[in-house]
Image (cartoon, coloured by chain):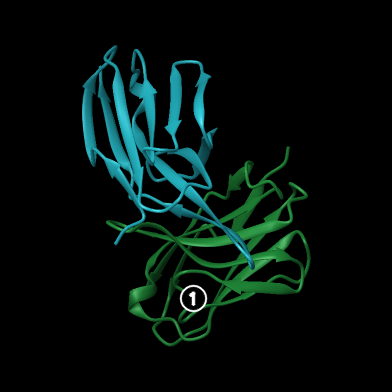
């Protein structure tokens, strides 16, 4: 089964509303990262958050290891927040480490 | 500015032909990765490398080869391109702590 599951698959907001994106993982956590992907574009790292809560402007990431979940909160959404939000789990191995991505949450913020 | 640069940005290839995607990083990172992105599958790891002249298989390596001739350069090679390899390909680099990932802008590959 899929090791990283994200919800919701898509979300439509009115500008100014808040959003809560979820990421659940089925394997033991090594570390968790959140990325933002512009429509048709590249990925930008938002948070490296193996545990606890981190803040960056209007974004907050919370990872709870025991519950195998991580969340991304977006406050006072703006139209420029539209895009896909991806969480990724780092798996550590003897041949190096790799990111396992969720499918993503497609966010659309309407003016 | 440190970056990951991919070339070409897009490419149309013929089934059975050879395709080479190139990636260059100026981050001084040890790790480099090739991912493909398909609708409904997210990003999946094809090959990666943690040192020059060495590559490792990712989760979906079949039909792909990789080459890391130097710390800065990492190539993905499709010896016999197939229709199923139509996708967007992303290269990335990361530091040894795996906390600093930088992605390239992607290569849109269409195999016809």
Front residue of A16 and B78: A16
Q: Position of residue A10 (x, y in %)?
A: 23, 38
Q: Residue furthest front?
A: A66
Q: Position of residue A17 (x, y in %)?
A: 26, 14
Kindly indicate the quadrant of the structure image that contains residue A9: top left
Q: Position of residue A82 (x, y in %)?
A: 34, 30
Query: Which chain is rendered cyan in the image?
Result: A
Residue A77, placed above or below residue B83: above
Q: Quadrant of the N terminus of chain A?
A: bottom left
Residue at image point 68% right, 46% down: B97
Front residue of A72 and B14: A72
Kindly indicate the quadrant of the structure image that contains residue B73: bottom right
Q: Quadrant of the C terminus of chain A?
A: top left
Residue at image point 61% right, 72% down: B56
Residue at image point 49% right, 45% down: A42
Say few, some or many: other residues with alpha carbon within 10 Å of mark 1 (under 14 / 14 to 19 / 20 or more). Answer: some
For the image, the number of numbered tags is 1
Please indicate whether residue A89 sits to the left or right of residue B32 in the image: left
Q: Colour of chain B?
A: green
Residue at image point 78% right, 66% down: B70
Front residue of B65 and B108: B65
Mark 1 lies on residue: B61
Residue A34, placed above or below residue B74: above
Q: Position of residue A22 (x, y in %)?
A: 32, 35
């Amino acid at each position: 089964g899929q090791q990283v599951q994200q919800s919701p698959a898509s979300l439509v907001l009115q500008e100014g509303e808040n959003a809560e994106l979820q990421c659940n993982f089925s394997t033991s956590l090594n570390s968790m990262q959140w990325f933002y992907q512009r429509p048709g574009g590249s990925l930008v790292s938002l948070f490296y958050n193996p545990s606890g809560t981190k803040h960056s402007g209007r974004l907050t990431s919370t990872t709870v290891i025991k519950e195998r979940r991580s969340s991304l909160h977006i406050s006072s959404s703006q139209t420029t927040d539209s895009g896909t939000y991806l969480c990724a789990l780092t798996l550590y191995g003897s041949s190096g480490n790799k990111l396992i991505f969720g499918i993503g949450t497609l966010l659309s913020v309407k003016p | 500015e440190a970056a990951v640069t991919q070339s070409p940005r897009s490419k149309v290839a013929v089934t059975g032909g050879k395709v080479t995607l190139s990636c260059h990083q100026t981050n001084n990172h040890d790790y480099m990765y090739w991912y493909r992105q398909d609708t409904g599958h997210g990003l999946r790891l094809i090959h990666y490398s943690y040192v020059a002249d060495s590559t490792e298989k990712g989760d979906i390596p079949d039909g792909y080869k990789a080459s890391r001739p130097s710390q800065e350069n990492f190539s993905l090679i499709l010896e016999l391109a197939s229709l199923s390899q139509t996708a967007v390909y992303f290269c990335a680099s990361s530091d040894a702590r795996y906390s600093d990932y930088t992605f390239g802008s992607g290569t849109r590959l269409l195999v016809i």
